[in-house]
């Protein structure tokens, strides 16, 4: 006889809270509205700003009836356009246009003369959800009781409380879903181990050589960088660091590169390009991210701790210049026995970026710091010398 708690007509396919947030993320990535609810009676229909066009905006405004929508943004974004506030704010928008809304969310323009109030807690959770979706942290919203239209199909509803739990919930679902040997350029032997969480996000551990996990293992946490890793962009040092790390690990007899899907310090590729545009206008890498409404660095390294644990790696020699990675791994319970610097070349295109990392984020660049601050272009090796270095390069 089935237990009293069981209902044989119900098929459980996952945690309802996790699934609700996942579906909300899908709608946000598609630029469609969702319903955000909080612990009280208030609920709101919220439309993400990223991907907004005039037709979608017109339909949304029409659904609001006589109540004009408000535009929510983070406190960082509000300060960027001249609004001082302790937390996320909501601006009354009387005659919204898609172009105007996007400008308020991402361009350097002065704040409009309009009513400004604190954003409701449910909408603050919506902004966090937009960040997780790697979209601009801004949304139009209206209380559901003021909505005059019926949405077809019905809108996905997301409890604000579930958003705060989402990262922890997805980490607990992390699994190894595939692995294979992958020989790399320069004769480097490696094994790619693919991890996937319950939300369908992938991360990769590149196990180089034959590391002894009973001892402290050289490890590099590397955030994906399409522009640097794949296309050799000179705006950053990401590709240089990846290639240096491979050489270090091969020379040490083995180690691990955790290749994490955290493009643009966790902002995502599109927002990284928006930040680049602001950098071209004179901002450094820190202020550009903040201007868009994000934290300077949105990355979370707890997933790295879980991946290392699943590989059986308890202690690491961390290949990094970034103190935040050291702090992040330690907080994830990983022992760090040593830090190994990765000092790539400085050029006219990445100097300002590297200088900001050193002076504002505390990155350790050793002897390169003097070069960065002085602004002198370091001598580049001759092509023959570069070829002689091979894949390892130098420190």
Image (spheres, rainbow, N blue to C red):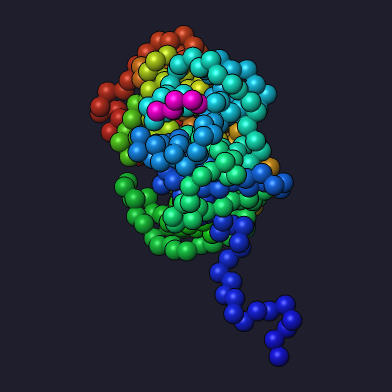
Q: How many marks?
A: 0
Q: As rendered, which of 180 and 378 lies closer to the eye? A: 180
In this view, which residue lies farthest toward the right?
A: 4
- Residue 235 position within the rendered picture, expressed as x and y whole percent measured from the top left: 37, 25
* Residue at (37% x, 13% y) in the render: 377
Q: Is residue 95 magenta?
A: yes
Left-right relation of 111 to 159: left
Question: Where does the N terminus fall, quadrant-wise?
Answer: bottom right
Q: Is residue 360 above or below residue 386?
A: above
Q: 351 left or right of 367?
A: left
* Range shown magenta: 93-97
Residue 77 position by quadrant:
top right
Q: Is residue 237 magenta?
A: no
The quarter of the picture where residue 9 lies is bottom right
| Left/right of residue 56 with respect to residue 132 in the rendered view | left
Residue 6, given in percent of the width and then of the height, sits at 68, 79
Q: Residue at x 55, y 38 (%)?
A: 142
Residue 273 at x, y percent in the picture? 38, 30
Q: Nearer the viewer, residue 75 or 343?
A: 75
What secondary structure do most residues of the magenta stretch adopt?
loop
């Amino acid at each position: 006889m089935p237990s009293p708690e069981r209902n044989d007509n119900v098929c459980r396919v996952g945690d309802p809270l996790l699934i609700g947030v996942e579906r909300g993320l899908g709608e946000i990535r598609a630029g469609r509205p969702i319903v955000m609810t909080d612990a009280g009676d208030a609920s709101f229909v919220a439309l993400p700003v990223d991907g907004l066009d005039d037709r979608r905006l017109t339909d949304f405004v029409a659904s609001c009836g006589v109540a004009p929508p408000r535009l929510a943004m983070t406190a960082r974004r509000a300060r960027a356009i001249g609004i001082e506030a302790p937390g996320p704010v909501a601006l009354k928008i009387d005659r919204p246009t898609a172009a105007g809304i996007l400008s308020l969310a991402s361009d350097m323009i002065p704040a409009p003369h309009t009513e400004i109030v604190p954003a409701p807690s449910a909408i603050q959770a919506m902004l966090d959800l937009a960040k997780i979706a790697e979209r601009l942290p801004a949304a139009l919203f209206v209380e559901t009781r003021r909505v005059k239209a019926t949405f077809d199909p019905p809108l996905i509803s997301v409890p604000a409380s579930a958003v705060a739990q989402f990262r922890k919930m997805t980490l607990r679902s992390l699994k190894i879903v595939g692995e294979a040997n992958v020989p790399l350029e320069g004769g480097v032997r490696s094994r790619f181990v693919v991890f996937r969480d319950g939300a369908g996000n992938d991360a990769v551990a590149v196990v180089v050589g034959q590391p002894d996990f009973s001892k402290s293992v050289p490890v590099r946490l590397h955030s994906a960088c399409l522009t640097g890793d794949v296309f050799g962009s000179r705006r950053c040092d990401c590709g240089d660091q990846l290639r240096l790390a491979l050489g270090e690990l091969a020379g040490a007899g083995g180690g691990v590169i955790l290749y994490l899907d955290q493009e643009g310090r966790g902002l995502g590729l599109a927002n990284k390009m928006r930040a680049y545009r602001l950098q071209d206008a004179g901002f450094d890498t820190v202020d550009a991210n903040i201007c868009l409404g994000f934290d300077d660095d949105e990355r979370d390294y707890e997933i790295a701790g879980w991946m290392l644990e699943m590989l059986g790696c308890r202690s690491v020699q961390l290949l990094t210049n970034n103190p935040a990675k050291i702090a992040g791994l330690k907080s994830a319970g990983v022992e760090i026995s040593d830090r190994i610097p990765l000092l790539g070349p400085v050029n006219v295109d990445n100097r300002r970026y590297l200088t900001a990392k050193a002076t504002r984020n505390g990155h350790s660049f050793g002897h390169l710091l003097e070069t960065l601050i002085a602004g002198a272009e370091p001598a580049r090796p001759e092509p023959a010398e570069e070829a002689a270095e091979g894949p390892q390069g130098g420190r």
